Amino acid sequence: MAWLFAREVVAIAAVAGMAGGCFAAQAAEKPAYSTGASDTEIRIGHTVAYSGPASAFGGIGRTYKGFFDMVNAAGGVHGRKITFISLDDGYSPPKTLEQTRKLVEDDNVLLIFGVNGTPTNTATQKYLNTKKVPQILLPTGASKFNDPKHFPWTMPFWPSYPLEQKVYVDHILKHKPDAKIGLLYANDDYGKDNLNGLRAALQAHGKPGALVSAQSYETSDPVVDSQVVNLKNAGADVFIIATTPKFGAQAIRKAHEIGWRPQQYVTNTSSSVNHVLIPAGVEASTGVITASITKAPDDPKLANDPEVVAYLAFMRKWNPQENPYDGTGVVGYMVGSMMLKVLERAGDNLTRENIMKVVSNLKGDHAPLLENGLVVSTTPDNFDAFQTLKLKKFDGKMWVDLN
Protein backbone atom coordinates (compact mmCIF):
# COMPACT_ATOMS: atom_id res chain seq x y z
CA MET A 1 0.00 0.00 0.00
CA ALA A 2 2.98 2.31 0.33
CA TRP A 3 2.95 3.04 -3.38
CA LEU A 4 -0.68 4.14 -3.16
CA PHE A 5 0.12 6.60 -0.37
CA ALA A 6 3.11 7.91 -2.32
CA ARG A 7 0.96 8.39 -5.39
CA GLU A 8 -1.56 10.42 -3.38
CA VAL A 9 1.21 12.66 -2.07
CA VAL A 10 2.36 13.30 -5.63
CA ALA A 11 -1.22 13.95 -6.77
CA ILE A 12 -1.86 16.45 -4.00
CA ALA A 13 1.41 18.21 -4.71
CA ALA A 14 0.35 18.57 -8.33
CA VAL A 15 -3.08 19.90 -7.36
CA ALA A 16 -1.61 22.48 -5.04
CA GLY A 17 0.98 23.68 -7.56
CA MET A 18 3.62 23.78 -4.87
CA ALA A 19 6.57 26.10 -5.22
CA GLY A 20 9.04 24.38 -2.95
CA GLY A 21 11.68 27.06 -2.72
CA CYS A 22 9.18 29.72 -1.74
CA PHE A 23 7.61 27.50 0.91
CA ALA A 24 10.98 26.52 2.33
CA ALA A 25 11.90 30.16 2.76
CA GLN A 26 8.64 30.83 4.58
CA ALA A 27 9.04 27.76 6.76
CA ALA A 28 12.38 29.07 7.97
CA GLU A 29 10.63 31.98 9.64
CA LYS A 30 9.05 31.69 13.07
CA PRO A 31 5.44 30.44 12.69
CA ALA A 32 2.70 33.03 13.15
CA TYR A 33 -0.88 32.08 13.90
CA SER A 34 -4.33 33.55 14.25
CA THR A 35 -7.21 31.81 16.01
CA GLY A 36 -7.86 28.50 14.26
CA ALA A 37 -4.26 27.63 13.37
CA SER A 38 -1.46 25.97 15.28
CA ASP A 39 1.58 23.77 14.81
CA THR A 40 -0.69 20.78 14.26
CA GLU A 41 -4.03 22.03 12.94
CA ILE A 42 -5.83 24.42 10.55
CA ARG A 43 -9.55 24.87 11.30
CA ILE A 44 -11.75 25.78 8.31
CA GLY A 45 -15.44 26.70 8.56
CA HIS A 46 -18.15 26.23 5.94
CA THR A 47 -21.93 26.24 5.62
CA VAL A 48 -24.12 24.88 2.84
CA ALA A 49 -27.69 23.73 2.23
CA TYR A 50 -27.65 20.06 3.14
CA SER A 51 -31.43 20.42 3.50
CA GLY A 52 -34.17 22.62 2.10
CA PRO A 53 -34.99 23.85 -1.42
CA ALA A 54 -31.33 24.22 -2.43
CA SER A 55 -30.08 20.94 -0.97
CA ALA A 56 -28.51 20.04 -4.32
CA PHE A 57 -25.66 22.30 -3.23
CA GLY A 58 -24.88 19.83 -0.44
CA GLY A 59 -22.77 17.87 -2.90
CA ILE A 60 -20.25 20.71 -2.87
CA GLY A 61 -19.82 20.42 0.89
CA ARG A 62 -19.42 16.66 0.70
CA THR A 63 -16.79 17.07 -2.00
CA TYR A 64 -14.87 19.57 0.15
CA LYS A 65 -14.88 17.07 3.00
CA GLY A 66 -13.58 14.28 0.79
CA PHE A 67 -10.89 16.57 -0.59
CA PHE A 68 -9.59 17.61 2.82
CA ASP A 69 -9.76 14.00 4.01
CA MET A 70 -7.47 13.15 1.10
CA VAL A 71 -5.10 15.98 2.00
CA ASN A 72 -4.95 14.83 5.62
CA ALA A 73 -4.31 11.22 4.62
CA ALA A 74 -1.25 12.43 2.70
CA GLY A 75 0.14 14.34 5.68
CA GLY A 76 -1.83 17.57 5.69
CA VAL A 77 -0.44 21.00 4.85
CA HIS A 78 3.13 21.51 6.03
CA GLY A 79 2.44 18.81 8.60
CA ARG A 80 -0.78 20.38 9.85
CA LYS A 81 -4.07 18.51 9.57
CA ILE A 82 -7.13 20.33 8.28
CA THR A 83 -10.20 20.24 10.52
CA PHE A 84 -13.07 21.00 8.15
CA ILE A 85 -16.32 21.91 9.91
CA SER A 86 -19.31 22.12 7.57
CA LEU A 87 -22.77 23.00 8.93
CA ASP A 88 -26.22 22.94 7.35
CA ASP A 89 -27.69 26.38 6.65
CA GLY A 90 -30.71 25.25 4.60
CA TYR A 91 -29.98 28.13 2.16
CA SER A 92 -31.65 30.37 4.77
CA PRO A 93 -29.74 33.63 5.42
CA PRO A 94 -30.68 33.84 9.14
CA LYS A 95 -29.57 30.23 9.60
CA THR A 96 -26.33 30.93 7.74
CA LEU A 97 -25.54 33.79 10.10
CA GLU A 98 -26.37 31.65 13.12
CA GLN A 99 -24.16 28.79 11.94
CA THR A 100 -21.34 31.14 10.94
CA ARG A 101 -21.33 32.74 14.40
CA LYS A 102 -21.02 29.25 15.86
CA LEU A 103 -18.09 28.45 13.58
CA VAL A 104 -16.26 31.67 14.50
CA GLU A 105 -17.12 32.04 18.18
CA ASP A 106 -17.51 28.42 19.33
CA ASP A 107 -15.52 26.34 16.86
CA ASN A 108 -12.74 28.94 16.54
CA VAL A 109 -12.11 28.54 12.82
CA LEU A 110 -9.31 30.39 11.06
CA LEU A 111 -11.51 31.32 8.12
CA ILE A 112 -14.81 30.74 6.32
CA PHE A 113 -14.36 29.09 2.97
CA GLY A 114 -16.27 28.09 -0.15
CA VAL A 115 -19.82 29.04 0.86
CA ASN A 116 -22.07 29.25 -2.19
CA GLY A 117 -25.15 31.44 -2.51
CA THR A 118 -25.57 35.20 -2.74
CA PRO A 119 -28.17 35.62 0.03
CA THR A 120 -26.30 33.31 2.39
CA ASN A 121 -22.96 35.08 1.98
CA THR A 122 -24.66 38.46 2.15
CA ALA A 123 -26.05 37.53 5.56
CA THR A 124 -22.56 36.99 6.99
CA GLN A 125 -20.44 39.49 5.04
CA LYS A 126 -20.66 42.40 7.50
CA TYR A 127 -20.26 40.14 10.52
CA LEU A 128 -17.13 38.44 9.15
CA ASN A 129 -15.57 41.70 8.01
CA THR A 130 -16.22 43.27 11.42
CA LYS A 131 -14.55 40.26 13.02
CA LYS A 132 -11.76 40.37 10.40
CA VAL A 133 -12.31 36.73 9.54
CA PRO A 134 -11.50 35.76 5.92
CA GLN A 135 -14.59 34.89 3.88
CA ILE A 136 -12.88 33.53 0.80
CA LEU A 137 -13.12 31.50 -2.38
CA LEU A 138 -16.88 31.87 -2.52
CA PRO A 139 -18.38 30.05 -5.54
CA THR A 140 -20.83 32.85 -6.17
CA GLY A 141 -20.72 35.50 -8.87
CA ALA A 142 -22.47 38.30 -7.00
CA SER A 143 -20.72 41.55 -7.85
CA LYS A 144 -21.12 42.81 -4.26
CA PHE A 145 -18.44 40.37 -3.10
CA ASN A 146 -15.78 42.11 -5.17
CA ASP A 147 -15.55 45.20 -2.98
CA PRO A 148 -12.10 45.20 -1.34
CA LYS A 149 -12.45 48.84 -0.30
CA HIS A 150 -15.49 48.26 1.92
CA PHE A 151 -15.23 44.50 2.53
CA PRO A 152 -11.53 43.61 2.45
CA TRP A 153 -12.10 40.21 4.11
CA THR A 154 -14.49 38.86 1.46
CA MET A 155 -13.38 37.36 -1.86
CA PRO A 156 -15.49 35.56 -4.50
CA PHE A 157 -14.24 32.74 -6.66
CA TRP A 158 -16.63 32.61 -9.58
CA PRO A 159 -17.33 34.68 -12.69
CA SER A 160 -19.59 37.58 -11.80
CA TYR A 161 -23.28 37.28 -12.64
CA PRO A 162 -23.19 40.52 -14.68
CA LEU A 163 -20.33 39.02 -16.72
CA GLU A 164 -22.35 35.84 -17.23
CA GLN A 165 -25.39 37.79 -18.40
CA LYS A 166 -23.19 39.80 -20.77
CA VAL A 167 -21.94 36.56 -22.33
CA TYR A 168 -25.53 35.41 -22.87
CA VAL A 169 -26.67 38.73 -24.32
CA ASP A 170 -23.72 38.91 -26.71
CA HIS A 171 -24.57 35.43 -27.98
CA ILE A 172 -28.33 36.05 -28.16
CA LEU A 173 -28.10 39.29 -30.12
CA LYS A 174 -25.45 37.91 -32.46
CA HIS A 175 -27.71 35.07 -33.53
CA LYS A 176 -31.12 36.65 -32.93
CA PRO A 177 -30.91 40.45 -33.21
CA ASP A 178 -34.65 40.87 -32.68
CA ALA A 179 -34.83 38.55 -29.68
CA LYS A 180 -37.59 38.94 -27.14
CA ILE A 181 -36.09 37.88 -23.83
CA GLY A 182 -37.91 36.56 -20.78
CA LEU A 183 -36.11 36.18 -17.44
CA LEU A 184 -37.01 34.03 -14.45
CA TYR A 185 -35.06 35.11 -11.38
CA ALA A 186 -35.02 34.61 -7.64
CA ASN A 187 -36.34 37.52 -5.62
CA ASP A 188 -33.13 37.77 -3.64
CA ASP A 189 -29.67 39.25 -4.09
CA TYR A 190 -28.61 36.45 -6.44
CA GLY A 191 -31.57 36.90 -8.76
CA LYS A 192 -31.48 40.69 -8.70
CA ASP A 193 -27.77 40.70 -9.57
CA ASN A 194 -28.60 38.65 -12.66
CA LEU A 195 -31.52 40.95 -13.51
CA ASN A 196 -29.36 44.06 -13.23
CA GLY A 197 -26.57 42.41 -15.21
CA LEU A 198 -28.99 41.48 -17.98
CA ARG A 199 -30.39 45.01 -18.15
CA ALA A 200 -26.90 46.52 -18.23
CA ALA A 201 -25.80 44.19 -21.03
CA LEU A 202 -28.88 44.99 -23.11
CA GLN A 203 -28.39 48.72 -22.48
CA ALA A 204 -24.80 48.43 -23.71
CA HIS A 205 -26.14 46.99 -26.98
CA GLY A 206 -28.73 49.77 -27.19
CA LYS A 207 -31.58 47.27 -26.83
CA PRO A 208 -33.11 47.64 -23.36
CA GLY A 209 -36.51 46.80 -24.82
CA ALA A 210 -35.40 43.29 -25.71
CA LEU A 211 -36.31 42.24 -22.17
CA VAL A 212 -40.07 41.81 -22.58
CA SER A 213 -40.75 40.25 -19.18
CA ALA A 214 -38.93 39.51 -15.93
CA GLN A 215 -40.69 37.20 -13.50
CA SER A 216 -39.48 36.68 -9.93
CA TYR A 217 -40.14 33.92 -7.41
CA GLU A 218 -39.51 33.36 -3.71
CA THR A 219 -37.28 30.49 -2.63
CA SER A 220 -40.15 29.42 -0.36
CA ASP A 221 -42.51 29.03 -3.35
CA PRO A 222 -43.46 25.44 -4.14
CA VAL A 223 -43.38 25.90 -7.93
CA VAL A 224 -42.74 28.54 -10.62
CA ASP A 225 -45.40 27.38 -13.07
CA SER A 226 -47.31 30.68 -13.24
CA GLN A 227 -44.13 32.66 -13.88
CA VAL A 228 -43.19 30.42 -16.81
CA VAL A 229 -46.69 30.77 -18.28
CA ASN A 230 -46.48 34.56 -17.92
CA LEU A 231 -43.16 34.63 -19.78
CA LYS A 232 -44.62 32.63 -22.64
CA ASN A 233 -47.67 34.90 -22.79
CA ALA A 234 -45.38 37.95 -22.94
CA GLY A 235 -44.13 36.68 -26.30
CA ALA A 236 -40.59 35.82 -25.22
CA ASP A 237 -38.66 33.64 -27.66
CA VAL A 238 -35.54 33.50 -25.46
CA PHE A 239 -35.75 32.22 -21.88
CA ILE A 240 -33.00 32.99 -19.35
CA ILE A 241 -33.27 30.98 -16.14
CA ALA A 242 -31.45 32.59 -13.18
CA THR A 243 -32.52 30.24 -10.39
CA THR A 244 -31.29 27.71 -7.88
CA PRO A 245 -31.33 24.08 -9.07
CA LYS A 246 -34.80 23.00 -7.92
CA PHE A 247 -36.50 25.86 -9.73
CA GLY A 248 -34.28 25.53 -12.77
CA ALA A 249 -35.54 21.98 -13.27
CA GLN A 250 -39.13 23.10 -12.74
CA ALA A 251 -38.81 25.96 -15.25
CA ILE A 252 -37.34 23.84 -18.04
CA ARG A 253 -39.93 21.10 -17.51
CA LYS A 254 -42.88 23.53 -17.37
CA ALA A 255 -41.84 25.32 -20.56
CA HIS A 256 -41.79 21.96 -22.33
CA GLU A 257 -45.15 20.91 -20.87
CA ILE A 258 -46.93 24.01 -22.16
CA GLY A 259 -45.40 23.70 -25.62
CA TRP A 260 -43.19 26.77 -25.28
CA ARG A 261 -39.97 26.31 -27.26
CA PRO A 262 -37.75 29.37 -26.71
CA GLN A 263 -33.97 29.19 -26.84
CA GLN A 264 -33.10 28.56 -23.19
CA TYR A 265 -30.10 29.77 -21.20
CA VAL A 266 -29.56 28.51 -17.67
CA THR A 267 -27.09 30.19 -15.31
CA ASN A 268 -24.22 27.96 -14.28
CA THR A 269 -25.59 27.91 -10.73
CA SER A 270 -28.32 25.61 -12.08
CA SER A 271 -26.36 23.81 -14.79
CA SER A 272 -26.18 20.49 -12.94
CA VAL A 273 -27.00 17.58 -15.24
CA ASN A 274 -27.91 15.35 -12.31
CA HIS A 275 -29.95 17.85 -10.28
CA VAL A 276 -31.48 20.03 -13.01
CA LEU A 277 -31.38 18.75 -16.57
CA ILE A 278 -32.26 15.11 -15.96
CA PRO A 279 -35.06 15.91 -13.46
CA ALA A 280 -36.44 18.41 -15.98
CA GLY A 281 -36.47 15.71 -18.64
CA VAL A 282 -33.81 15.05 -21.23
CA GLU A 283 -36.09 15.99 -24.13
CA ALA A 284 -36.98 19.27 -22.44
CA SER A 285 -33.35 20.06 -21.55
CA THR A 286 -31.66 19.21 -24.84
CA GLY A 287 -30.37 22.40 -26.45
CA VAL A 288 -30.17 24.44 -23.24
CA ILE A 289 -27.11 26.73 -23.15
CA THR A 290 -24.96 27.71 -20.18
CA ALA A 291 -21.69 29.57 -19.58
CA SER A 292 -18.93 27.67 -17.82
CA ILE A 293 -15.37 27.90 -16.60
CA THR A 294 -14.87 24.20 -15.88
CA LYS A 295 -14.04 21.14 -17.91
CA ALA A 296 -16.78 18.52 -18.34
CA PRO A 297 -15.38 15.27 -16.91
CA ASP A 298 -17.75 13.19 -19.04
CA ASP A 299 -16.50 14.74 -22.29
CA PRO A 300 -14.99 11.85 -24.31
CA LYS A 301 -12.34 14.21 -25.68
CA LEU A 302 -11.05 14.65 -22.11
CA ALA A 303 -10.92 10.95 -21.22
CA ASN A 304 -7.13 11.06 -20.98
CA ASP A 305 -6.82 14.58 -19.58
CA PRO A 306 -4.60 14.22 -16.47
CA GLU A 307 -6.76 16.55 -14.39
CA VAL A 308 -9.95 14.72 -15.30
CA VAL A 309 -8.34 11.36 -14.61
CA ALA A 310 -7.13 12.57 -11.19
CA TYR A 311 -10.53 14.05 -10.37
CA LEU A 312 -12.46 10.89 -11.25
CA ALA A 313 -10.04 8.79 -9.19
CA PHE A 314 -10.52 11.18 -6.25
CA MET A 315 -14.31 10.96 -6.48
CA ARG A 316 -14.29 7.16 -6.62
CA LYS A 317 -12.22 6.91 -3.45
CA TRP A 318 -13.06 9.95 -1.36
CA ASN A 319 -16.61 10.96 -2.36
CA PRO A 320 -18.25 7.89 -3.92
CA GLN A 321 -21.80 8.88 -2.97
CA GLU A 322 -21.79 11.79 -5.45
CA ASN A 323 -22.15 11.59 -9.21
CA PRO A 324 -18.63 12.56 -10.41
CA TYR A 325 -20.04 14.02 -13.61
CA ASP A 326 -22.26 16.46 -11.77
CA GLY A 327 -21.25 20.09 -11.42
CA THR A 328 -21.27 20.04 -7.63
CA GLY A 329 -18.34 17.61 -7.55
CA VAL A 330 -16.42 19.60 -10.13
CA VAL A 331 -16.93 22.87 -8.25
CA GLY A 332 -16.02 21.32 -4.90
CA TYR A 333 -12.83 19.80 -6.25
CA MET A 334 -11.69 22.96 -8.04
CA VAL A 335 -12.43 25.33 -5.15
CA GLY A 336 -10.96 22.90 -2.61
CA SER A 337 -7.80 22.73 -4.70
CA MET A 338 -7.49 26.51 -4.62
CA MET A 339 -7.92 26.51 -0.84
CA LEU A 340 -5.07 24.04 -0.59
CA LYS A 341 -2.93 26.21 -2.84
CA VAL A 342 -3.58 29.26 -0.64
CA LEU A 343 -2.67 27.36 2.53
CA GLU A 344 0.50 26.02 0.96
CA ARG A 345 1.57 29.51 -0.08
CA ALA A 346 0.79 30.92 3.34
CA GLY A 347 3.43 28.55 4.71
CA ASP A 348 3.94 28.98 8.46
CA ASN A 349 2.40 32.46 8.43
CA LEU A 350 -1.15 31.31 9.15
CA THR A 351 -2.56 34.64 10.22
CA ARG A 352 -5.85 35.87 8.87
CA GLU A 353 -4.07 38.90 7.43
CA ASN A 354 -1.62 36.74 5.50
CA ILE A 355 -4.39 34.49 4.18
CA MET A 356 -6.02 37.58 2.63
CA LYS A 357 -2.66 38.73 1.27
CA VAL A 358 -2.13 35.39 -0.48
CA VAL A 359 -5.64 35.05 -1.85
CA SER A 360 -5.66 38.61 -3.22
CA ASN A 361 -2.39 38.17 -5.09
CA LEU A 362 -3.06 35.23 -7.40
CA LYS A 363 -1.12 35.76 -10.62
CA GLY A 364 -2.30 33.74 -13.59
CA ASP A 365 -2.81 30.61 -11.52
CA HIS A 366 -4.35 27.44 -12.84
CA ALA A 367 -7.01 25.56 -10.90
CA PRO A 368 -7.57 21.86 -11.61
CA LEU A 369 -10.53 21.32 -13.99
CA LEU A 370 -10.47 24.95 -15.11
CA GLU A 371 -11.09 25.21 -18.85
CA ASN A 372 -7.91 25.28 -20.92
CA GLY A 373 -6.84 28.85 -21.55
CA LEU A 374 -8.54 30.28 -18.46
CA VAL A 375 -6.50 31.44 -15.46
CA VAL A 376 -7.10 32.77 -11.97
CA SER A 377 -5.84 36.27 -11.23
CA THR A 378 -6.59 38.67 -8.37
CA THR A 379 -5.14 41.91 -7.05
CA PRO A 380 -5.67 43.76 -3.76
CA ASP A 381 -7.88 46.20 -5.68
CA ASN A 382 -9.83 43.65 -7.73
CA PHE A 383 -10.93 40.33 -6.24
CA ASP A 384 -12.65 39.08 -9.42
CA ALA A 385 -10.69 35.94 -10.27
CA PHE A 386 -12.23 35.34 -13.73
CA GLN A 387 -12.74 37.59 -16.73
CA THR A 388 -14.32 35.27 -19.29
CA LEU A 389 -16.46 32.14 -19.71
CA LYS A 390 -17.11 29.48 -22.34
CA LEU A 391 -20.56 28.73 -23.73
CA LYS A 392 -21.74 25.13 -23.70
CA LYS A 393 -24.88 23.34 -24.93
CA PHE A 394 -26.56 20.28 -23.45
CA ASP A 395 -26.76 17.57 -26.13
CA GLY A 396 -29.04 15.25 -24.18
CA LYS A 397 -26.18 13.51 -22.40
CA MET A 398 -23.57 16.10 -21.48
CA TRP A 399 -22.43 19.67 -21.89
CA VAL A 400 -20.50 20.18 -25.13
CA ASP A 401 -18.62 23.23 -26.36
CA LEU A 402 -20.78 25.63 -28.33
CA ASN A 403 -18.85 26.60 -31.44
Image (spheres, rainbow, N blue to C red):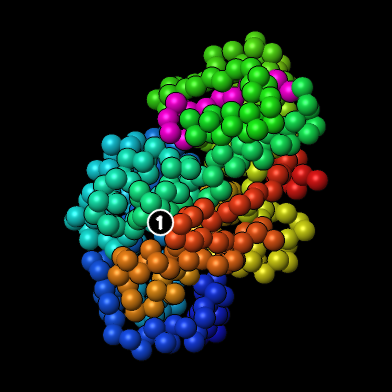
Residue 349 appears in the picture as rendered: yes
Residue indicated by mark 1: 136
- Judge whether 167 appears above or below 361 on screen: above
- Of 98 and 389, nearer the camera is 389
- Judge whether 28 appears above or below 64 on screen: below
Picture residue at 42% right of the left edge, 30% below the top: 188
Residue 106 in the magenta stretch? The answer is no
Q: Amino acid at mark 1?
A: Ile
Residue 14 x/y as whole percent:
57, 75
The residue at the far left in this view is 106
Residue 153 x/y as whole percent:
35, 55
Residue 390 x/y as whole percent:
69, 48
Picture residue at 37% right of the left edge, 85% below the top: 27
Residue 155 x/y as whole percent:
43, 54
- Judge whether 14 appears above or below 336 on screen: below
Picture residue at 80% right of the left edge, 32% below the top: 175
Picture residue at 49% right of the left edge, 87% below the top: 21
Q: Residues within 10 Å of mark 1 (few under 14, many from 20)?
A: many
Q: Is residue 371 left or right of residue 102?
A: right
Badge 1 element: strand
Residue 189 in the magenta stretch? The answer is yes
Give the magenta part as a residue range: 179-190
- Of 359 and 394, nearer the camera is 359
Residue 322 appears in the picture as rendered: no
Q: Is residue 335 left or right of residue 86?
A: right
Please count the marks in the image: 1
